[in-house]
Structures are given as C-alpha cells and as structure tokens.
Amino acid sequence: MTRRLATLIAPVVFLLALLYAWTLAADAKLVNPLWFPGPERSFAKLGEWIATGALWSPLASTVWRMLAGWLAACAVGIALGAAIASSPLARRLLQPSAEFLRPLPASALLPPAILVLGFSNAMIVSVVAFGCVWPVLLAAIHGFGALDARLVEVARLLNFTPWQRAWKFQLPSALPHIFAGMRVSIAIALIVTVASEMLSSQPGIGYLMLVAARAFRSTDIFAGIIVLGALGFLINYGTQRLEGRLLRWR
Amino acid sequence: MLEARGLSVSFGAQPVLRDIDLTVAEHEFVCVVGPSGCGKTTLLRALAGLTPISSGSALFKGRPVIAPQTELAVVFQDYARALLPWRTVAGNVALALEARNIPASDHAARIAPLLAKLGLSGDGDKFPSQLSGGMQQRLQIARCLAQEPEVLLMDEPFGSLDAITRQQLQDEVARLAKEEKRTVLFITHDLEEAIYLGDRVIALARVKGNLAGRIAEIVDIALPRPRQQLATREDPRFLQYRHRLFRHLE
C-alpha cells in the first residue's frame, strides 16, 4: 500500500520540483523577465484564457486538425499496410514510391500543400496525415505479415476466405504493432499541427503562440506550451487506456 | 472414410513418403507410429490437404483431398501456437462455429456443452495464456469438435504434455471418439500410446538408402474397450503387440 502510494506521489513531487526550478530560474533573472516569465505568471495567463473563454476556439481547432489527420493516417496506414503485407503485387507497386516519400519531412510538404489546398483546415489535416502515416504503415506491414505459420494453417483448415483471415487473424495479431505505431504517430501529429499553424497562419494554439512571440507577449507563449504539454499528456493517457482495453489478452 | 492410395510426397528431390496405402474405416481409431523423421506428420498433413502430394492420392469418402476441408479437423501438437491468443476460451471455440456460418445467437448454447465435455466449464472467459498446457490442448480439441468434423486428424497431440496429463487425455479422447462416433487418425512416436488407443496400429519406417517413409506393418489391436491405464497395459496381448511392433522403431 505504501509502495503504491509512493509510486503515485513520486511523479507529482518531481513535477512540482520542476515547477520550483522554473520559478527559481525566473526569479534569478538570468534572462530578462520580459522574455522569460515564471510559472506563476504563465499559469495566471492560462487561467485568464480559461476565464474569458479565449482558449477554447484555438484549442478546438488544433485538436480537431490533429485528430483528423492522425485518424486519417491510421486508416490509410492500416489499409495500405494490410495490402502490402498480403499481396506481392501491391508490394512491388507501392514500396518504391513509399520509400521515396517516407524520408520527406512533413513540413517540406507545406508549400505545395498550401498551393494546392490553400490556407485551410484540409491543407493542415493532409500534411498532418502525411507526417503520421509512416509509423502506422510500417507497423501494419510488419504486423500483418507476422501471423504465425500455424495460425495460417488453422485459417486454411477452417476454410476462411482471405478477407475473413485478415479480419479474424491478421488484424488482431497485428494490433499490438499497430498500436505502437499509432502512439508514435500521435506525437508527430501534435508537432506537425503546431508547425503547420505557425507557417500558414491558421487560428490555433500554434498560431496563437507565433502571434504572441511577434508581439513580445512571453506569458502567452508559455501558457501555450503548458496547454500543448497537457494535450500530449492526455492523448498519451487515452491511447494507453484504449490499448489496455483492446489488448487485454497480453 | 479416409484413404491413401499409392501416396508419395517429396520435398524437392528428397522423397519423404513412398507408396503409402491405408484405409481408415468409419468410426475407427487408427494410430500411426514411427521413429522421428519417418514422415508421420507429413502423412497426416497430406491427408488433411495441407501438404501437396507428389503422386498417388488422398481420398475422403472417395473424393480426392486437394485442399483442407472442415470435415477434416487437425489437432496440432503445438497447441499454444494453434490457439488465437487474443480470443477467450469461448471465443476460440466460436472460431469453428464462425467457419460453419452458425449464427452468433446460437454460439453460447453450442459452446457450453463442448467446454463441459472437455472439463473447461468455468474457463470460458479466460485467455489461453491463463491455462495450463493440458487445458490448452483440451481447448484445441474442443475447437476441433465444434467443427463437427467426420475425421479427427491428431498429430502427436500429447507429445509435449507431462505423463499424468497425457494419460488423462488419452482416456478422454478414447471416450470422446467412441461417444461422438468420430473417425480418428492419431499420429504418435509412443508405441504404447498407439497400442493403448488404436483399433489398428500402422507402423511407419524409413526405407534404407533413400530415407522415404513406407508402411512397415499394420496390426489389428484386439484389446477390449473401454481400456484402462493399468489393466490394459498389463494385458499379455498388449505386451505381445509391443514386442511385435517394437523392431520397427529401431
């Protein structure tokens, strides 16, 4: 019991220590307080955003773009991965193009995306999806191809069709790999969303921070960082819970 | 019911089985015994439609077996690999019902008696990883029975179980085969197990020189049923069969 309590409290204590270190660093005024506010002022700004409701609209935009791009990437990645793993034709057809596109940084795609789709949500969602698709795709290729040979025979003995085999055998067997890929992707989604907002001036947390920087409103920047950190934390917690439920058998 | 006619199997240039002729009659329990590497498992796989035949034929009810069919169920030795780890005990049995397109609403009513028959009542919600080896093998047998096959092909099913569990399962399989009126082809490297279980024992041996397996001897086992672990194994006839067949295993 005391052990459990300790493991629960320890991370909180560490977080408080970090906040205290931040306070000390700010109070020491090594950097001009104009550029580097302490936690007190940053959290006060965050409280002000919540109180006035100024936070919700940009936060909703950012979360929406991030989730839409990520989910689209997951759907495309799983479907393509299943196809590539199951069909030599699909592999020969798709793999060279995939190897060409994969090393491209998602931000390099912003200029052409802006040209084609304009300054829009669709543009950001597409770029986020592009950045997110690779970890899921690679995990799905690996996972769908890694079905135990014995289970392949069980599927044959029960006369399942290729679709039934994919649904009843390969997808569940690939799911642990796919989840690992999806968790890598969600972090990429947050990064690409914020970067895209900054580069394309679309209202959201990223753009809010960029405007704050241009106007020397440093507390806004730090409040934005706190929001993004909390967002990342919550998403990771959510995917972990979902994973625990769906992979109960492990 | 199940027949091999001049059945030969080669892996590339390497002959594995040569000119196998055997017939398994309806409701008969036939054991195939032989030293490791004599092609016993290949014979079972060829009869199940899992391994292609080089010449001759495998027949089920007079029709050639070209691919696996649900009337022929296979119980593998490596039960842990043959079960779906992400499905519960009940879910693994349901797999065979899904293969037969039985509506999901009927599953529970069909699964419960099967689990009871194999001593798995109360374990329906567990995952395979939570079961002992013997229980996992019982589960695989339950799934094969849910297939309602006419023939059970068992490939050294008790080879990796401890001696006590093995004896229990021998008696249960013998009882189930008679109660459920199934035809059984049972592969084993354990001569005593073959004599104890079989109505007939087929000894397989390797042809000197080219290393292909062929039938060395077929013996009818005239031991009364139900057989008993102590009494049957001490029966003078049991020992005579053992003497007679033992030379093929050297």
Image: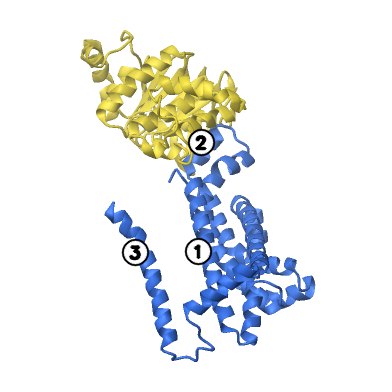
Chain colours: A blue, B yellow
Q: What crowding class fits label 3: few (fewer than 14 Cα within 10 Å), some (14-19), or many (20 or more)? A: few
- Do discs 2 and 1 belong to a common subunit? yes
Contact between labelled residues 1 and 2, with CB atoms less than 8 Å apart: no
- Between label 3 and label 1, give the one nearer the viewer: 3
Q: Secondary structure at mark 3?
A: helix
Depth check, front residue: B193 or A42: A42
Which kind of residue does numbered mark 3 sit on?
A: Ala
- Residue B114 percent coordinates (x, y): 46, 21
Real-space Cα distance between discs 3 and 1? 17 Å
Amino acid beneath label 1: Phe
Q: Which element is circle 1 on? A: helix
Q: Which residue is mark 1?
A: A233
Residue A88 vs residue B162: left or right? Answer: right
The quarter holding residue B219 reads: top left
Disc 2 marks a residue whose amino acid type is Val
Q: CA distance from mark 2 to mark 1?
A: 41 Å
Residue tagged by mark 3?
A: A10
Mark 1 chain:
A
The residue closer to the viewer here, B88 or B233, is: B88
Q: Chain of mark 3?
A: A
Q: Earlier in the sequence, mark 3 or mark 1?
A: 3
Q: Earlier in the sequence, mark 2 or mark 3?
A: 3
Q: Is residue B83 left or right of residue A5?
A: right
Q: Which residue is drawn at the image coordinates 43% and 26% (left, top)?
A: B141
Residue at which label 2 appears: A154
- Residue drawn at point x = 61 percent, y = 84 percent: A213
Taking the spot 31% from the left edge, 10% from the top edge, the residue there is B223
